Amino acid sequence: MLKVKGLTKIFGGLRAVDNATLEVAPGQIVSLIGPNGAGKTTLFASIAGFYKIDEGEVELLGQNILGLPVHEIARRGMVRTFQITQPFAKLTVLENIAVGAFQQFASMTEAHAHARLIAEKVGMTGMLDQPASELTVAGRKRLELARALATGPKLLLLDEVMAGLNPQEIIEIIALIRSIRDSGVTILLIEHVMHAVMSLSEYIYVLSYGKIIAQGKPQEVVTNREVIEAYLGRGAADQMGEKEQGEAHA
Amino acid sequence: MNLNRSPWALHALLLLAAMVFPFVSNSAFVINFGVLALFYAFIGQSWNIAGGFAGQLSFGHVAFFGVGAYASTIVQMRFGFNPWWGLPAAALAGAAAGFLIGVMSFRAGLKGSYFALITLAFAEVFRIIANSVEITGGGLGMLIPMKQTAANFQFGDRRVFYFIILALTVISVAIALWLKASRFGARLAAIRENEDSASALGINIFVEKIKIMAISGAIAGAGGCFFAQYFLYIDPTIVFGVDKSVEMLLVSMIGGAGTVYGPLIGAILLAVVSEVTRSMFSFQGLSLVLYGTLLVIIIAFLPNGLIELFKRKKLKDGDQLSVTSSTKAGEA
């Protein structure tokens, strides 16, 4: 579905993303995790065409999409959401979602009907006539997801759709993401909520200081020494390593 | 929202009122007032379609207006075409100007206030060009010889002009209504609200913005043609002057930018203010002073324009409606 090879993005003297290689197979849920400032969002934006990258290749559905404008990439089926939500503030929830739906339908009636369907799926039916500016954080996150979903994507790039949600809302959105995948949409997500990442992902890439330092199935990744070091520091990694060794001895 | 409940009845009523208006009194003053109001509404709608619907705030919309006025006048005076050809020529020239200015500004990535400033600059450039080349008659302008026949697009009976500008205004309102109810319009609203999100959802913002600039330019261009035929004289300062840009923008903002009938409301107010001040004071330009004052008041109390006054009442009805429906849902 998506192949990224050696992607590098430099801002001035900073290699925000450094030689990142990753692959997402059709029908998978793949996560991209990493400490704050690791370059996850930059990597997303680069893949989706928002940044001109310095090196590397990006392939979507076997086609090179490097240098294509953002809207063209979106039309080919890869749609991103924004970590800092970017709603069409003065438009209603329905109109917001319909903007996405218009990618699939030319008529207003059809687009609105589809938008209602999507709203029901993401649990926004009660808010259809509210202006997007009046939504809570959770509402805006859902709206980001709904709008992207309404375009009929093949691959969704979800950038921290769970940040700022309460535990109950997280449970709901995990179920929602699963159901989206089950409907045939491949998902690549950035997330900090670890239990969500663990329960959702089939494969995880870990980014730290712009480099992919680890990858694998969820269980492999969380026991990886480098990952622990990146998140918790070397001391913690040493301690945990000793503990594991101790356990192994006993 | 609730304006849409019986939209066609509202449109029909407004159209009927506009058609009856010139028969209320045949005094030159009344007819002239009607023509003026509709003319402002028409060119205001041109600004509104780009500025209100698509968020492309232009300070130099007069560029399209002036190009239209000159295109129509040049076509008949220099090339000897029938003056009626001036109208499509003006619309076409306006569209071409909108397209060109759009391509150049948007290619350079100009947005918001930068776009506003560059359009202002374009209008000035056009004014200077019109002032210095021969085909436009330079600073002397062009005087269209008076020959009041229908074939000549000139009418002794000013009511005919009234109905022509009414027809043009109806077309512009129809375009606005179409924008409210179409994919193109929805995309423009998305672009107005957030360009990054719009392109992330697959909208080609460059192309959509150019399209709307061309449409808006065509309307303003047609307005220029009407102006030339009505007053039979144009010169660079009149048809490329900043004041007309300001009028287009004010009419739309005061009435309610981004709404279908906003420019109409703003235009009637501008016409009233300018006629009243003109008949009461001999002081030139006082109408715009007064109008500016009104603008300040309206921005302070009705930031979304006068149309708010009509909507607020209806919104209250809507609130009650949703309350009753939710209580019903609660009971069930």
Image (cartoon, rainbow, N blue to C red):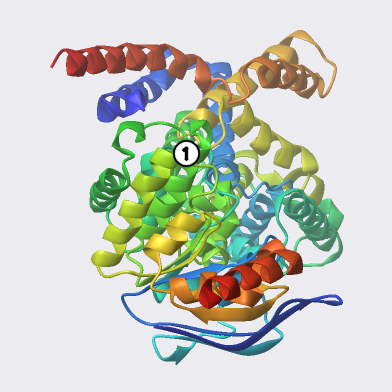
Q: Is residue B89 above or below residue A25?
A: above
Residue at 75% across / 61% down in the picture? B136
From this viewpoint, which residue is outermost toward the left? B332
Residue farthest toward the front in the current orientation of the protein? A250
Which residue occupies 69% across, 52% down? Answer: B66
Is B20 or B332 nearer to us in this picture?
Answer: B332
Residue A21's quadrant in the figure?
Answer: bottom right
* Quadrant position of the N terminus of chain A in the picture: bottom left
Relative to A215, is B331 above or below? above
Q: Position of residue A9 (x, y in %)?
A: 71, 79
Above or below, A102 against B290 in this view is below
Question: Which structural element holds mark 1?
Answer: loop
Front position in the image: B103 or A218: A218
Q: Nearer the viewer, residue A209 or A152?
A: A209
Q: Position of residue B91 (x, y in %)?
A: 53, 57
Q: Which residue is labeled 1 in the image?
A: A166
Give left or right: position of A184 versus B39. Answer: left
* Residue at x-position 44% and y-position 41%: A167
Residue B301: where, in percent of width, then height? 65, 15
Count all numbered tags in the image, as a single digit. 1
Looking at this view, is B309 or B174 the one in front? B309
Name the spot of residue B39 as percent of width and height, x first: 56, 35
Amino acid under disc 1: Asn
